[in-house]
Amino acid sequence: MIVCGALGRIGQELIRLIDESDDLTLAAAVDRAGGEGIVQRLSDYQGEADVLVDFSHHAAIWEIMDYCEARGIPAVIATTGHNPEEAARITEATTRIPVFHSANMSVGVALLARLVQQAAAIFRGCDVEIIEKHHNRKIDAPSGTALLLAEAVKKERPDSVYVHGRVGNAKREPNEIGIHALRMGSVVGEHEVIFSTDSQTITLSHSAHDRSLFAEGAIAAANFILDKPIGLYRMEQLLGE
Ligand SMILES: NC(=O)c1ccc[n+]([C@@H]2O[C@H](COP(=O)([O-])OP(=O)(O)OC[C@H]3O[C@@H](n4cnc5c(N)ncnc54)[C@H](OP(=O)(O)O)[C@@H]3O)[C@@H](O)[C@H]2O)c1
């Protein structure tokens, strides 16, 4: 397995799990800072690899997709915050190699997204608000997971409009999904989706206690796409099997 973002918070967890595992081998640890045992540029590694896992930075996607396509290596893209051009590059790659793409590698969040979609289908007219909390070093806001959950609502309510925070004269419209990003301390990741009518409120939530959860999910995703045909794979498919 090639790990991109190897010196990062999740990359380190991933390498720890690979070291502890009997059936996984680290092919290359890639991070732009370089250092002992670290490959600074992905293209510098031309040794064997069955799969690449990315927990680096959204801007690295060009180099990663070019590399995986050129070598026919399946990719697990766990990095978040891709702009529309970067997201389109991922979509393009899914026509050439197997790509597993998920803003949240946690099976629990995949389940939460299913429950959110069900709730949105049952409580059609209610107000939906999403609150996400993360550590104060997180780059992108709102989190990719908050957007994933908003998309789960939008599947049932296609006219939904995302409103990021509210300030000033900001009276709520019925089709709004309010999305609020809190950044503080060392919070690993918390997401709450609130469904509120005039008479009741339902809150569905998920808390990540430990970052290893994402690394474990990425390993499951890597095993899942190893022998898959070219295409796009998501957590839902992994859950389904
Ligand atoms: N899908 C999921 O379940 C999930 C879960 C958690 C996090 N994430 C996402 O995964 C990414 C990494 O998260 P993290 O908390 O581990 O971040 P992090 O601690 O900042 O780690 C990212 C690492 O990647 C390095 N890097 C930056 N640009 C690079 C490039 N072009 N090539 C190679 N390495 C590069 C960074 O180096 P510098 O320090 O020099 O910038 C850093 O060492 C973020 O996008 C985060 O949102 C996804």
Image (cartoon, grey):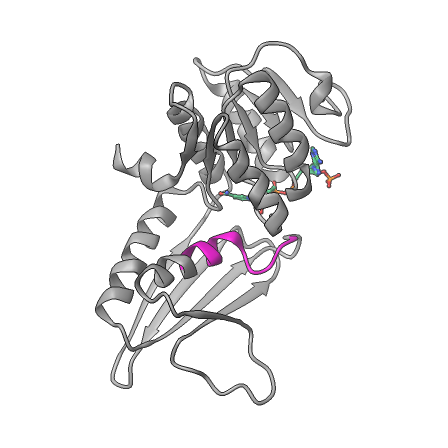
Q: In this picture, which residue range is highlighted in magenta?
A: 139-149
Q: Position of residue 152 (x, y in %)?
A: 36, 57
* Above or below: residue 17 compared with residue 26: below
| Residue 234 placement: quadrant | top left
Residue at coordinates 40% horizontally, 35% vertically from top-left?
233
Viewport quadrant of the C terminus: top left
Quadrant observed for ligand 1 in the rendered image: top right
Residue at coordinates 30% horizontally, 59% vertically from top-left?
117
Q: Position of residue 7 (x, y in %)?
A: 67, 32
Left or right: where 102 falls relative to 28: left
Viewport quadrant of the N terminus: top right
Please state which of residues 132 and 212 is positioned toward the viewer in this rendering: 132
* Above or below: residue 238 compared with residue 138: above
* Above or below: residue 61 compared with residue 137: above
Residue at coordinates 39% horizontally, 70% vertically from top-left?
159
Q: Position of residue 208 (x, y in %)?
A: 45, 49
| Residue 160 placement: quadrant | bottom left
Left or right: where 218 falls relative to 13: left
* Above or below: residue 66 compared with residue 10: above
Q: Position of residue 137 (x, y in %)?
A: 66, 53
User: Would you say residue 6 is visible in this rendering?
Assistant: no
